[in-house]
Amino acid sequence: MPAITNHMPTAELQRLDAAHHMHPFTHGNGLSAKGARVITRADGVWLNDSEGARILDAMAGLWCVNIGYGRHELAEAAERQMRELPYYNTFFQTTHVPAIALAARLAELAPGDLNHVFYAGSGSEANDTNIRIVRQYWAEKGKPSKRKIISRKNAYHGSTMGGASLGGMAGMHAQGGLPIPDIHYIDQPNWWAEGGEMTPEAFGLERARQLEAMINELGEENVAAFIAEPVQGAGGVIVAPDSYWPEVQRICDKYEILFIADEVICGFGRTGRWFGSETLGLRPDIMTIAKGLSSGYQPIGGSLLSDEVAAVISGHEFNHGYTYSGHPVACAVALENLRILDEEKIVERVAEDTGPYLREKWEALADHPLVGEAKIVGMMASLALTPDKSARAAFASSAGTVGFVCRDRCFANNLIMRHVGDRMIISPPLVISRDEIDILIERAWKSLDQCLQDLH
Ligand code: PLP
C-alpha cells in the first residue's frame, strides 16, 4: 500500500476512510456516498482541507481549541515532556512534576475551595468518576442510600455508559441499554421551545423548582447529586432565563445534595470568565473539566473537588483510576495552555472586547427572517430557526431538517457552524479577532439566506 499522506488524492483518502474508519456520531451511508471532509492542517481559527479550502472553524473543533490552532509552544511543551518523562502513572502513591504543577495551578484558578483534582483522559471519563465519587462520598458519610443523581433532559455529559446515562439525550439512551439505574431527569430551561405562554422569568423558576419536586419525590435521603452544564452546549447552547440559576442554587443549598457543574465546555474562558460557574453565580461541590483545559492539544479531563468532598473521599482507598490519569505529557501541555490563556489575557479579551463585539453582531442575526431567538454567552452562541418568529413555531418538517440544510450551506461557504435540531450553534476559538468575527457573521448571513431560498 502506498504511504497515506496529505498528498494522496482526496477521493482515495475518503475511500480508505469509509472502508476502515468508524466515525463517532456519523451515519455510515453518508460517508460512503459523499466521503468525509479531510482536514489537513490548521492555524488560528482556520482549517485547511485536502482540496485547498480555508474554512473558518466557528466550533473550535468540538468546543475545545480555546487558544486556537497552531501554537508551537504546546508542541514544544509536549516534546520536552516526552523526552524527559513520557509516561508514568499516579497510582499507588507515585506522582510527577507535571501532575503536581497542573493540580496546583487548577486550585489557584478554580473558584471557591475546589482545590483538588482527580485526573481523567476526557470529560466522559471525568463524569464517570463523578458518579463514583458522589456515591462513595455519601457511603463514607454513613448515608449509602444517597445514590440517585438528578440530571436534565437534553443535557450532554459524555459518551461512556456513565456519561451518556447522566446526559439526557433520548437518541443516545435508545442505543445500548441506557440509562444505567438511579439517574433521573428534570426538564431543561429552554424557554424558546418549551416556555409556552409563560414569561422567561416565570418559566425559569418553574424549571428550577422541578429540581425541588424531584428531590422530594425521590426522597432527599436517596439523592446524591444534581449535575448540570452552566450553559447546555451540545443540547443547542441553551441559555437559562435569569431566574433559573439562583433558584437552583437555593435548592442545592437547602437540601443535602452535591452539585456537579459540568464545565467541560464552559470552563477555561468560554463564557468570558475562567469558569461558567463564575459567570452564572454557581457554587458547585464538584466541577467536570476537559476540552479547553488543554485546548484539545492533548486528551485530558478531570474532576475538581471541594475541600470537604476531597477529604471524605481521601479517608479510604478510592478504588478507581485510569492508566492515563494525570498523564505527564497531557499535564505539561495543559499547563502551557493555561499559561498562554493567562499571559495573553485571552479570557479578559473575551469579556471586554471580542465577546461584546460578537454579541452585537450575533444578536443582529435575529433580524433574519429565519431566525427566532439569538442567544450568546461569551463565545458560545445559538440561533433558533423558525418559520414564524412571533409564534416561536417549530418547522412542520421533522426536527433538524432545516438545521441540517443550513449546516450544509455553512459548510459549502467554508464556515463550520453546527446544528442541533433546528438550532444553529457556534463556539469559536477564544482568540478569534474582530475581522474574523465579521467574516463569520457574513458567511452565517449568506448561509441563512441560501437556506431560506432552499425552503421555497
Ligand atoms: N460534558 C460536556 C458538557 C460535554 O460537552 C462533553 C463533550 O462534548 C463531555 C462532557 C464529554 O467529554 P469528552 O468528549 O471529552 O468525553
Image (spheres, helix red, strand yellow):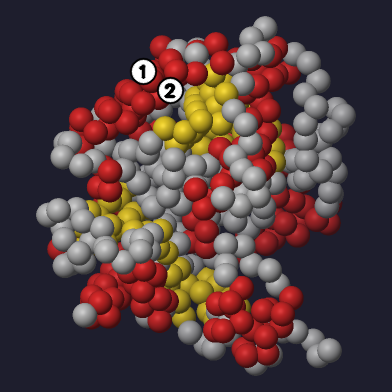
x and y percent of residue 8 in the render? Answer: 69, 90
Residue matched to label 1: 250
Question: Which image quarter is the C terminus in?
Answer: bottom left
CA–CA distance in space, label 1 to label 2: 15 Å
- Residue at 75% x, 84% y: name it: 4
Q: Secondary structure at mark 1?
A: helix
> Mark 2: few, some, or many residues within 10 Å (few <14, many ≥20)?
some
x and y percent of residue 193 in the render? Answer: 28, 48
> Mark 1: few, some, or many residues within 10 Å (few <14, many ≥20)?
few
Q: Horizontal placement of 4 versus 356: left or right?
A: right
x and y percent of residue 65 in the render? Answer: 53, 58
- Residue at 52% x, 58% y: name it: 62
Of 411 and 18, nearer the camera is 18
Of 309 and 373, nearer the camera is 373
Find residue 11 and name its label.
none
- Residue at 38% x, 36% y: name it: 187
Three-letter amino acid code of the residue under disc 2: Met
Observer-side mark, 1 or 2, equals: 2
Of 80 and 26, nearer the camera is 26
Farthest top residue? Answer: 142
Number of on-image labels: 2
Three-letter amino acid code of the residue under disc 1: Arg
* Residue 303 visible in this rendered orientation of the protein: yes
Question: Which image quarter is the N terminus in?
Answer: bottom right
Q: Is the residue 158 above or below the residue 360 in the image?
A: above
x and y percent of residue 355 in the render? Answer: 31, 52
Which image quadrant for residue 385? bottom left
Asked if disc 2 is less than 8 Å from ligand 1, the answer is: no
Residue matched to label 2: 214
Q: Is the residue 282 above or below the residue 163 in the image?
A: above
Which image quadrant for residue 320? top right
Q: Secondary structure at mark 2?
A: helix
